[in-house]
Amino acid sequence: MSLIDKIDKTRIPRHVAIIMDGNGRWAKQRGMIRSFGHENGVPTVHNITEVANDLGIEYLTLYTFSTENWSRPQMEVDALMHLVVTSIEKETPELIEKNVRLTTIGDMARVPEFARERLLKCMADTAHCTGMELCLALSYSSRWEMVEAVRHIASEVKSGVLELADINEDVISSHLSTAHMPDPDLLIRTAGDLRISNYLLWQIAYSELYFTPVLWPDFSKDDFLEAIIDYQSRERRFGKTSEQVTNHNEQN
């Protein structure tokens, strides 16, 4: 039985988020500079986007560039920005063909103007697509996002638009970059590190976490399918007991 045959098509996660880690180590293992690893990670983005779309996943969010990454050597930052833009421009016609919509979350004001304008054009070109949303977390960190949300909420309270007593989880969620998406059902991190790295911290409160030692450039469609199969083997309780979940499922 193939991996695809093992997947329950009725239990596909709506939203999968991925921390694409290991490009630098992949390059180092081959005696190459880090940018070589980033370049070889691009085909993996293409392949995982393709298989996720084929499975019927509605949202795929990729941790592309964190706010902390701005502190990396300028040569690497410049190479990454150029790589992101050229790769997305190259992929845009196929995204349109596959009905995939491109979006971003993050502090786009920090992204160089040349990159920002070209990314905005790609987003505009795919805005009419109604299939899977491919979201790039670019110049993003969860703490930055939360600070921005708090600032906006405080401003609304100060202006009288919002009452202090009305602030709840839904209000906070509605002020995050991901307000239009469901929270991730599954978070995948490649390359073996067991940490979240300031990524979607509010949103992954009840996400299933999947860690694999496979470096991002080597992460294949089969590796992705294995993650989905593992996700489907878990019981998602959201704070309830196993018995409560079973009874609820039986009633529905």
Image: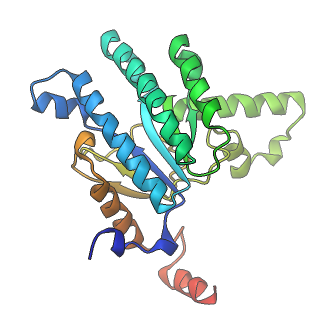
- Which quadrant holds the C terminus? bottom right
Residue closer to the observer: 75 or 179: 75
Residue 120 occupies quadrant: top right
Whether residue 134 is visible, yes or no, is no
Residue 61 in the image: above or below residue 109: below
Which residue: 26% across, 52% down?
A: 212
User: Does 236 sit above or below residue 27?
Assistant: below
Residue drawn 22% across the image and 25% down it: 36
Quadrant of res 126 = top right
Q: Residue furthest right?
A: 160
Res 154 seen here: yes
Q: How many marks?
A: 0
Where is 58 relative to 40, above or below? below
Find residue 121 and report its horizontal and vertical position in percent: 60, 24
Give the quarter of the figure containing the N terminus.
bottom left
Q: Position of residue 209 (x, y in %)?
A: 39, 56
Query: Where residue 221 sits: x, y (%)?
Result: 31, 54
Which residue is found at the position 41% from the left and 71% from the top? 232
Q: Which color scheme does this rendered protein use? A: rainbow
Residue at horizontal 52 percent and vertical 48 percent from the top? 98
The picture places residue 244, in percent across and down from the top left corner, at 56, 83
